[in-house]
Image (cartoon, helix red, strand yellow):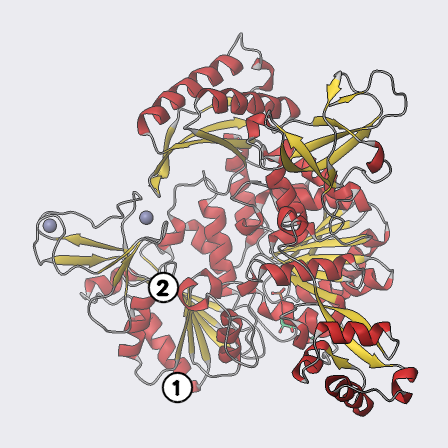
């Protein structure tokens, strides 16, 4: 214990201790002992004694001050590592995340700075290559000793040699060290970076912008050049060349000496964009996404920190790339739900982008063919600059849309999933040797298996969902899989409840559609792309990941039909694709989320947008039982603004986002009884707080009654939800924090978490 009563120049470090539960988390003060004076700053990772037992724990220093209100303060034990520390911006981001998303500091820290604890403990570290050179002394020396003869003569033939090469000659570390000490050889170490994208740099094709693209570029460049934290929305129809405009803006930013982050919604959707940028910027680009190994991520970060990177391209978490001197942040397809994190910290990438743009006076560019209502509203009302691209590039025209009414086939008792119209169009494409893309919204074979005799649906024992049948082409049997917890059993022959052998199969996914395609078009070459076929790294020369391999194969005409889940719907640019098919549009149109139509519009518009992107005109076949559906009409015409204008009226009338925010409180527990008790009390407490005489009546919030989560049980955890309609203000955050604190201490077996404007309500 340090007694600070008599000393004048003592400094104190305020720290967050890592891995504490939310309720125990606050800034703890420690005195900085003399031997650490000048070594501890905000952002330093230190070791501190914690709790009564004084266990040594990792902590992050967030502030330094020269007085402390407590008499007895424990000392900082040591600086834990010099491999990593946080700068002012990163520390600020941690606090921002903690305050806005109600997460622990540790969760925020890992999100912002990577696995700090692993790095501090040396579990994740740089790899070095050691190169040995022959010195002049060594070249002239005559030395005895067989191994030492051998080392020197090998180096006389070729210098330098790596440590590995010398080891193969029998050179041990001791011998090499000795020769270095004698000045006969010298060693240089070089950091190696693990980088799957290294080989992507090649000589890119140059393209000049069209007149319309130039206009858009000029308008956006003006914002960029202002060196202010401005924001713009580039709204351009599919195939209008948004990527080219963005590329030109990146060039401009990099030329002015500033760096760029380009975010894409999903790495499998954007292989091409990634490759385009890699080919242009070569070693100056780093790619960050979740399929990288921890070592690759770590090395990518180090390359960025070393200042050799101008452009970072990646998915959501790449927003935290430690670039200095940011000039521009781009969110491509900004409406995508993948920009919202659904794990703690539950942040929206746009909010982080705003924060970083403000910090660096950088430009935030949102780009989309179907902007989110929030963004288009902001653009319309002037907080973002709105820039439009209204035509497809070159000779390309928008595809002809054919609505295929499923009732007509049903009337003919045709139960095929691929209806007659879509069949005809696929056949035409096969005859003409043109390519087709088919979108199916689920993976697997059948979505559920039920018993004809007793009516039971086979469900997951751990989750309240049906099991999905997965099986190989036309085989019998198969595996039943839970898409929530990955529980798997072999397909039973008899009903598990009544032993009847009459089982029926309903709902379909990509595997069944693939089977049907094979039967209908035996000669067609088909590629399937869904979560089951893309996981893991590829084994081919031209691709690092499996999704790349599938897309490359399709691009190289190794298949006629690409069939898949939403992975095939967006972003891709295949000039030979002239037909797209949406196998079941209704599955997207009828969901009970207030944003369901917005999403359906976006999805259908994007799928249609994959066809006819080059000189050959394209067609889109949309299968539906509801051909009159309004949303379908708007997306068939690719009429975003028409759709927006009609839908925004309803949002305004109902006071739904963007005219309000939603806070979702989720309670979860393995103990159903305690969950109910906690839910009831939360409901009561909340109503008290925002009620007429409550301490938070001023925030004008409405609380809906608690209900079960759409999937009530996942992995044996039961979940209840409570939705608050509100404005996301400081007062609201304060109230939610109080609720979280109260309930965490009162119901230790119930987890209460908050999510602001979640992707699903
Ligand atoms: P978007 O992202 O708006 O859907 P893309 O940027 O993918 O559109 O462009 C559509 C197609 O048109 C791509 O094949 C692209 O290479 C081509 N293209 C767009 N602009 C140009 C240009 N200025 N010069 C050459 N090709 C272009
Ligand atoms: Zn049965
Ligand atoms: Zn399950």
Can residue 159 be seen here? The reply is yes
How crowded pointer 2 is (Cα within 10 Å; few <14, some 14-19, many 20+) is rated as: many
- Tell me where residue 693 appears, x and y as whole percent: 53, 7
**Which image quarter has ligand 1?**
bottom right
Q: Classify the position of the N terminus by image quarter.
A: top right
Residue at image coords 73%, 43%: 90
- Tell me where residue 424 appears, x and y as whole percent: 33, 76
Q: Are marks 1 and 2 in contact (CB under 8 Å)?
A: no
Q: Residue furthest front?
A: 144
Circle 1 sits in a helix, a strand or a loop, which is it? helix
Q: Which residue is mark 2?
A: 583
Please identify, in this view, whether the residue under mark 1 or under mark 2 is nearer the observer: 2
455 over 191 or under it: above or below: above
Q: Residue furthest top?
A: 693
How many angstroms separate mark 1 from mark 2 (CA)? Answer: 21 Å
Q: Which residue is mark 1?
A: 431
Residue placed most toward the observer, 597 or 470: 470
């Amino acid at each position: 214990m340090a007694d600070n009563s008599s000393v004048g120049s003592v400094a104190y470090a305020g720290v967050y201790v890592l891995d504490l539960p939310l309720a125990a988390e606050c800034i703890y003060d420690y005195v900085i002992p003399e031997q650490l004076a000048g070594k501890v700053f905000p952002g330093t990772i230190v070791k501190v004694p914690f709790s009564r037992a004084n266990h040594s724990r990792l902590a992050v220093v967030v502030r330094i001050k020269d007085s402390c209100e407590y008499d007895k303060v424990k000392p900082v034990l040591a600086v834990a590592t010099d491999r990593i520390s946080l700068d002012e911006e990163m520390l600020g981001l941690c606090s921002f995340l903690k305050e806005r998303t109600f997460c622990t500091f540790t969760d925020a820290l890992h999100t912002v700075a990577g696995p700090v604890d692993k790095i501090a403990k040396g579990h994740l570290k740089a790899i070095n290559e050691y190169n040995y050179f022959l010195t002049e002394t060594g070249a002239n020396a005559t030395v005895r000793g067989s191994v030492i003869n051998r080392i020197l003569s090998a180096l006389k033939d070729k210098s330098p040699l790596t440590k590995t090469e010398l080891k193969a000659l029998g050179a041990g570390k001791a011998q090499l060290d000795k020769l270095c000490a004698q000045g006969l050889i010298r060693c240089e170490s070089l950091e190696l970076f693990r980088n799957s994208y290294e080989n992507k740099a090649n000589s890119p094709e140059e393209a000049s912008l069209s007149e319309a693209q130039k206009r858009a570029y000029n308008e956006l460049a003006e914002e960029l050049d202002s060196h202010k934290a401005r924001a713009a929305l580039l709204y351009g129809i599919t195939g209008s060349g948004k990527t080219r405009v963005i590329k030109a803006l990146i060039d401009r930013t990099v030329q002015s000496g500033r760096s760029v982050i380009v975010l894409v919604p999903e790495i499998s959707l954007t292989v091409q964009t990634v490759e385009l940028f890699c080919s242009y910027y070569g070693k100056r680009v780093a790619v960050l996404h979740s399929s990288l190994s921890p070592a690759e991520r770590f090395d990518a970060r180090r390359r960025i920190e070393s200042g050799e990177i101008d452009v970072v391209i990646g998915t959501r978490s790449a927003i935290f790339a430690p670039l200095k001197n940011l000039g521009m942040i781009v969110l491509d397809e900004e409406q995508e739900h993948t920009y919202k994190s659904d794990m703690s910290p539950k942040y929206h990438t746009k909010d982080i982008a705003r924060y970083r743009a403000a910090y660096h006076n950088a430009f935030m560019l949102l780009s989309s063919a179907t902007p989110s209502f929030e963004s288009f509203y902001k653009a319309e009302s002037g907080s973002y600059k709105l820039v439009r691209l209204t035509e497809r590039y070159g000779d390309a025209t928008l595809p002809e849309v054919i609505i295929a009414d499923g009732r007509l086939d049903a009337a003919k008792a045709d139960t095929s999933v691929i209806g007659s119209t879509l069949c005809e169009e696929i056949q035409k494409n096969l005859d003409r040797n043109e390519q087709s893309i088919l979108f199916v919204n689920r993976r697997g074979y059948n979505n559920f298996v039920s018993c004809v005799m007793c009516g039971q649906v086979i469900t997951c024992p751990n989750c309240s969902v049906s099991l999905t049948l997965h099986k190989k082409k036309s085989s019998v049997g198969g595996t039943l899989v839970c898409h929530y917890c990955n529980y798997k059993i072999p397909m039973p022959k008899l009903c598990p409840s009544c032993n009847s052998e009459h089982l029926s199969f309903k709902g379909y996914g990509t595997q069944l559609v693939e089977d049907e395609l094979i039967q209908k078009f035996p000669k067609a070459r088909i590629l399937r792309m869904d979560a089951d076929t893309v996981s893991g790294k590829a084994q081919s020369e031209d691709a690092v990941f499996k999704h790349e391999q599938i897309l490359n194969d399709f691009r190289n005409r190794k298949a006629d039909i690409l069939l898949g889940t939403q992975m095939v719907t967006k972003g891709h640019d295949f000039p030979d694709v002239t037909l797209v098919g949406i196998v079941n549009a209704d599955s997207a149109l009828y969901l009970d989320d207030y944003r369901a139509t917005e999403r359906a519009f976006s999805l259908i518009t994007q799928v249609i947008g994959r066809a006819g992107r080059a000189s050959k005109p394209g067609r889109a076949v949309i299968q539906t039982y509801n051909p009159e559906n309004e949303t379908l009409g708007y997306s068939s015409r690719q009429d975003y603004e028409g759709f927006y204008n009609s839908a925004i009226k309803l949002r305004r009338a109902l006071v739904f986002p963007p005219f309000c925010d939603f806070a979702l409180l989720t309670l979860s527990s393995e103990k159903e009884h305690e969950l109910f008790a906690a839910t009831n009390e939360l409901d009561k407490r909340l109503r008290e707080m925002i009620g007429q005489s409550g301490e938070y009546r001023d925030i004008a919030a409405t609380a809906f009654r608690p209900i079960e989560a759409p999937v009530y049980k996942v992995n044996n955890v039961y979940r209840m939800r409570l939705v608050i309609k509100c404005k996301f203000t400081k007062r609201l955050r304060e109230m939610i924090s109080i609720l979280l604190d109260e309930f965490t201490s009162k119901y230790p077996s119930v987890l209460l978490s908050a999510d602001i404007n979640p992707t699903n309500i």
